[in-house]
Amino acid sequence: MSPSGLPGIDYALNPYGGCEHGCVYCYAPEVLHTDWKEWRVVKVRSNIPDRLSKELSGLEGTIGIGTVTDPYQYAEKRFGLTRKCLEILKERDFRIHLHTKSDLIIRDLDLLASMRGEAGITITTIDERISKITEPGAPLPERRLEALRRLVEAGIDAYALVGPVLDHLEGNEKEFADAVASTGVRRICIDSLNLRPQLSERLNRMNIRGSEKAKEKIRRTAEDSGLVVMDVF
Ligand code: SF4
């Protein structure tokens, strides 16, 4: 684990390196000075449960799981590292903050429901066609909305991360915000597009932009539905 500068998270835990979801707006490769195509090659940190057991001694605080890459990308189905880490953290009663873009999270409802902390799922569109373009390797939106419902039903402190808000949401803000609210989450985090040089080039080529207008409209609609809306940072 590494110390984390993220608000409310003391240590960051990422069982995988790289990410299969291939989101066109992902800025992680640029932050980590990695080529974007290379970023989709997953590194499986198979010794992470052993390392975690050792490194937890004497620590306290909240462990952020999936601060850089998705802990429930498809590799997790095969390798189960996130689940093994959760089992260790549960045994030692650590508080967690887990974030994903995958409905594979519901496989671990049993563990999550008995742990302290919160779990979030990113949703950026309810349009399957847009999702297949912008997040080609990730589960489709309806599966993520259903996963949010299941988290809420299981009594887990769940939130939706709406971001980055892209311009395809313009004109569909209410339908989108209503779909998120229908899952039963009580709060959403909302985020703007975080542009970096290579990312700007890629999105310009694809004619995709961020939209502050849609972001503010979603914020107002969600607040009118009684949701608490927070900015990501
Ligand atoms: S899920 Fe997150 S880390 Fe993975 S490609 Fe998408 S934005 Fe990047």
Image: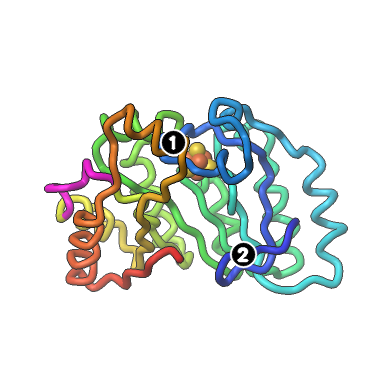
Q: Residues within 10 Å of mark 1 (few under 14, many from 20)?
A: some
Which one is in front in this view, the residue at disc 1 or the one at disc 2? 1
Q: Secondary structure at mark 1?
A: loop
Residue 151 visible here: yes
Q: Estimate the x, y position of residue 141 in percent, counting from the top left.
A: 33, 41
Point out the residue furthest to the left here. 171
Residue 172 within the magenta-colored segment of the rendering: yes
Q: Estimate the x, y position of residue 184 in percent, counting from the top left.
A: 31, 63
Q: Estimate the x, y position of residue 25 in percent, counting from the top left.
A: 41, 40
Residue drawn 44% across the image and 36% down it? 23
Residue drawn 55% across the image and 63% down it? 113
Q: Which residue is mark 2?
A: 96
Left or right for 118, reference 38: left
Q: Is mark 1 within 8 Å of ligand 1?
A: yes
In the depicted view, which residue is nearer to us: 21 or 141? 21
Residue drawn 66% across the image and 63% down it? 4
Label 1 to label 2, Cα distance in Å?
Answer: 25 Å
Image: magenta residue range:
166-173
Residue drawn 66% across the image and 47% down it? 82
Left or right for 203, reference 55: left
Split into 4 quadrants, where in the image is the N terminus? bottom right
Residue 73 within the magenta-colored segment of the rendering: no
Q: Secondary structure at mark 2?
A: strand
Q: Estimate the x, y position of residue 193 in percent, counting from the top left.
A: 37, 50
Q: Which residue is mark 1?
A: 23
